[in-house]
Structures are given as structure tokens and as C-alpha cells.
Image (cartoon, grey):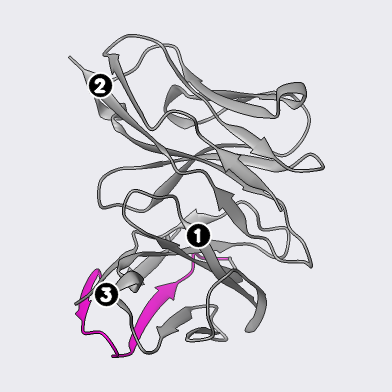
Amino acid sequence: AQSVTQPDIHITVSEGASLELRCNYSYGATPYLFWYVQSPGQGLQLLLKYFSGDTLVQGIKGFEAEFKRSQSSFNLRKPSVHWSDAAEYFCAVGAGDTGRRALTFGSGTRLQVQP
Amino acid sequence: ETGVTQSPTHLIKTRGQQVTLRCSSQSGHNTVSWYQQALGQGPQFIFQYYREEENGRGNFPPRFSGLQFPNYSSELNVNALELDDSALYLCASSSGLAGYEQYFGPGTRLTVT
């Protein structure tokens, strides 16, 4: 079965600094990969996705992520963080068996932004 | 385009009771998935419905059940509530069986006392 690891539970960065959130997955084939963001008490908003093709994908709000097959990673990056980026970020893997299309999520990384 | 909506927003129930949560899928989407998110954790897949049929289930007991209606809206029912059922319940909609790209509603916060 697939799994997702987000090694960093909590990250604090200064506003304007660059950001990288780590995500590692375990799956036998090439999975579908996603990053979602969740503000307190809210649902999940899709930031970006990787299905195939170019391994560097662009998303909303200035985020990008790079798929590295050799490292089983899909790290999320942003060149300059804004205070409004403070939230919880989840990496997810889509890898269906028996036809279901379920997402497996990591445990999340909480981002704090210092002024 | 209307997004995914869920009702109610919050709910407080007593252990042993039953609860029904509701979800309306995004316009044009015919697949609904339900997830449970305990405090401080990532969402966990409960089950998925496609064209009114259950299309896969996660590691949840049978007291978690669901329905999907002809308009693709969906219900999640939980019987014999336990304290550990306290969580944020998220509904996600997608299009067809290629639907890994899922769009989430705001969730229902269930508290079991």
C-alpha cells in the first residue's frame, strides 16, 4: 500500500524568505501527486498536482513542486513567502487499487510566517 | 460554478447516537469521497461513491455507511458513535473514475461527548 511522509511537523520562516516543504512517498509505480493547503477550521484547497510529463509543476498562489522519481519525493517550494501563506500543508498520493480513486495523505506540515 | 458544500458545519452528539452528514458535489462532478480528519492528522479515506454505488472503502467499520443520490449529492451515516469519532469530516468531489483530482468542501466538525 502507498504511504506519504512529511518529515517536518512545523516550519517557521520569515516573510519574504523562500520555502521548501518536504514530501516523500512510497508506491511501486508512478503515482499521482498533490499538494493541498488547509487554513484553520477550513477544508482543503488544491495547490497543484502532478500526473505525468514535466517534473516541475506550477500551482496557484506562486507555489511550485518538483517530482523526483529517484528520491520518491515531491517537495513544495515558494520563492518568497507571504504572511497569508501561514497554514497547514498536506502532500497526497493518488494510487488506486481495485478501481477506487482514494487519496493517501501525509500528516501535514504547519507553516508559521514571522513578520 | 458551485463548489462542494457540506452541512451542518458543526455537530455535537452523545456516545451511542447516530449522525448523518450531507454533501453536495461540485457542478459536473459525479464522484464523491469522504474523509475523516482527526485533530492534528491528515485526512483518512472512508469511502467513495460513483454513480450511486460504493466504489472502494478505507479501513473503517461497517457502522460508517453512505449513500449517493441521482443528483450526485451524498450522505455519510455513522451509527453507535464513539468518542474517537470526533473529527472533521471532509467530502470531496471529482469527475468520473479518473477522479484523483478531488475538490474538498469546508467539512463538518463532529464532537462526540
Whole-angstrom CA distance, mark 3 to mark 2, is 32 Å
Mark 1 or mark 3, earlier in chain: 3
Query: How far apart are the two marked residues, 2 and 1, measured between alpha carbons?
Result: 27 Å
- Seen in the image, is B74 located left or right of residue A74? left
Chain where mark 1 sits = B
Image height of B113 relative to A79, above or below: below
Q: Secondary structure at mark 3?
A: loop
Chain containing mark 2: A
For the residues bearing labels 2 and 1, Cβ distance under 8 angstroms? no
Circle 3 Cα neighbour tier, 10 Å, few/some/many (<14 / 14–19 / ≥20):
some
Q: Are the residues tagged 3 and 2 within 8 Å (C-beta)? A: no
The residue singled out by tag 3 in the image is B8
In the image, which is nearer the foreground, mark 3 or mark 2?
2
* Residue interval drawn in magenta: B9-28
Residue type highlighted by circle 2: Val
Binning the other alpha carbons within 10 Å of mark 1 as few (below 14), some (14 to 19) or many (20 upward) gives many
> What residue is rendered at 50% in x and 59% in y?
B44
Name the residue carrying label 2.
A113
Q: Is residue B54 left or right of residue B38?
A: right
Q: Amino acid at mark 3?
A: Pro
Query: Which residue is more in the foreground, A87 or B24?
Result: A87
The circle drawn on residue B44 is 1
What x and y, as percent, mark residue B8? Answer: 27, 74
Q: Is residue B51 visible?
A: no
